[in-house]
Image: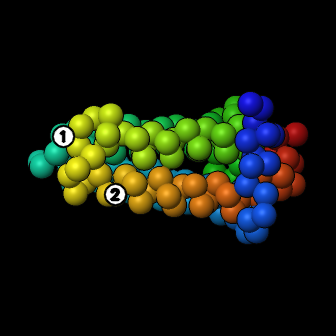
Amino acid sequence: MRTDELMDMTNGVPKVITPATHAVLDYITAGTFIAMGFALLGRNRRAAGLAFANGAAVLGLSLMTDYPGGVFKTVSFRTHGAVDMLQAGMSAMGPALLGFASEPEAQMFHAQAAVEAAVVAATDWNNSEAQRLAA
């Protein structure tokens, strides 16, 4: 499936999140995951590892995206959206794959995946702000 086809799957949801707002949300998400990783180190190392992996993934993608706040700008904003959906899946399925789905820590990952899906659906992936930066 092409990136533009993936983005079209969110039709019907108001596109209220601009690239700049999306960037802020991404950096907050990365920081939250990293902080969560440190908080979980003493009680659930698998959950801590998943939190660090999610934080690193979100931070790395954010640094490489061609939106306000991106540093290296090698990934298009629309491609970023497709990767966001993969990251949400990693957050949602990670607790089951790592064997802690029935533990309380799993709920943090499930909640983040739901929030990520909502952000993807509400982001204006065709916003001219990101297209100007890519040019």
- Single out the mark in the foreground, 2 or 1: 2
Marks 2 and 1 sit apart, C-alpha to C-alpha, by 15 Å
Q: Nearer the viewer, residue 130 or 110?
A: 110
Residue 86 position, x and y percent, is: 55, 38
Which residue is label 2 attached to?
Answer: 108
Which residue is label 1 attached to?
Answer: 45
The residue lying at 79 percent from left, 57 percent from top is: 11
Q: Residue furthest left?
A: 42
Direction from residue 22 to residue 1 in the image, left or right: right
Q: Nearer the viewer, residue 85 or 36?
A: 85
Residue 121 position, x and y percent, is: 67, 58
Residue 126 position, x and y percent, is: 83, 52
Q: Quadrant of the N terminus?
A: top right
Query: What's the residue type where badge 2 is placed?
Result: Met
Name the N-terminal-most of marks 2 and 1.
Answer: 1
Q: Is residue 79 above or below residue 9?
A: above
SS at badge 2:
helix
In this rendering, does residue 38 appear at all? no
Query: What's the residue type where badge 1 is placed?
Result: Arg
Q: Is residue 59 above or below residue 26?
A: above
Q: Nearer the viewer, residue 45 or 67?
A: 45
Direction from residue 135 to residue 10 in the image, left or right: left
